Image (spheres, rainbow, N blue to C red):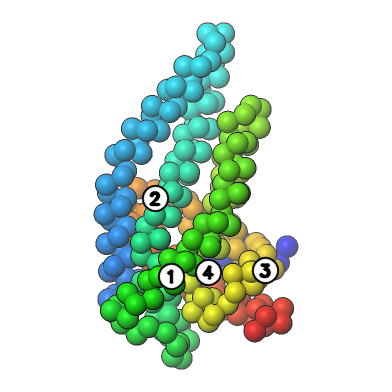
Amino acid sequence: MNGSVSEGIGYFMRGASLLKHPRLRPFILIPLAVNVVIFGALIGYSIAWMTSTMESIVGWLPGWLDWLTWLIWPLVGVSLALATGYLFTAVAILIASPFNGLLAEKAEEVITGQEVQGPETIAQAFMIFPRAIARELRKFAYYLPLLLIVLVISWFPPFNLVAPALWFVFGAWMMAVQYVDYPMDNHMTAFADLKEVLRERRLSSLGFGGIVALVAGIPLLNFFVVPAAVCGATLFWCEELRSTHRQLGLG
């Protein structure tokens, strides 16, 4: 597999450092505000729901299998934490999608020093909201079958023992597709081409998406994961994926 997991992780870390850039601050505020409102409102519900679900699962065990409780709690807890983290991130992304595209555009201009054609202001970003939502729904349609497969596996022993690993791999790939789409969509890249380019740089993609998935499940830090991931994905595009895109004859 091509690419490097460490390089992929590095894109996210460097993207997080770009949040301090004065030219990007105005375009970070809306995605950040959306994250704070959504995560803040739902975090209490998610904790209560996860606790209730895990207690129900443990309650199904016969008495002679009580010793499995120590194994089930961390397995189910990690799976549900990742699943809810992805769900809430998806809702935040859907609402803020036009502004994420605008942030990717401005981040690319900072990285390359070259102008990118697209909306120039937050007001103009509102004008492309229908197109941005349609693109997000296209991504959700791609994720849904994969999500259902992982969900089914997660509830049937003994396959559910590998559920946390499956959730992580699924989440890493999903996050890579989700965020790299912003800079590539700014260059009018077809969704099928996006997936082909990421598969060609699979290790870098999983490294980038994996660190985003991990941070998305960490309280407080997940408030900042969306703008940091958008900037990191833009670095990924500029430094690695753009050349791959050309080598594959896609643009």
Q: CA distance from mark 3 to mark 2?
A: 27 Å
**Mark 4, residues whose alpha carbon is within 10 Å: few (<14), some, or many (≥20)?**
many
Q: CA distance from mark 1 to mark 3?
A: 21 Å
Q: Which residue is mark 1?
A: 132
Task: State the quadrant of the N terminus.
Answer: bottom right
Amino acid on which the number 1 mark rests in the picture: Ala
Amino acid on which the number 4 mark rests in the picture: Val
Q: Which residue is mark 2?
A: 88
The correct choice, above or below, for 104 with respect to 34 in the image is: below
Q: Which residue is mark 3?
A: 196
The total of numbered circles placed on residues is: 4
Amino acid on which the number 2 mark rests in the picture: Phe
Residue visible at 53% across and 15% down in the picture: 61
Query: Where is residue 103 drawn, in percent x and y?
Result: 38, 75
> Do residues under tags 4 and 3 come within 8 Å of each other at their CB atoms?
no
> Do residues under tags 4 and 2 come within 8 Å of each other at their CB atoms?
no
Q: Which residue is mark 4?
A: 180
Helix, strand or loop at mark 2: helix
Q: CA distance from mark 4 to mark 3?
A: 12 Å
- Mark sitting earlier along the chain (4/3): 4
Amino acid on which the number 3 mark rests in the picture: Glu
Helix, strand or loop at mark 4: helix
The correct choice, above or below, for 152 with respect to 189 in the image is: above
Q: Is residue 220 visible?
A: yes
Residue visible at 46% across and 91% down in the picture: 114
Residue visible at 57% across and 46% down in the picture: 147
**Mark 3, residues whose alpha carbon is within 10 Å: few (<14), some, or many (≥20)?**
some
Q: Is residue 20 visible?
A: no
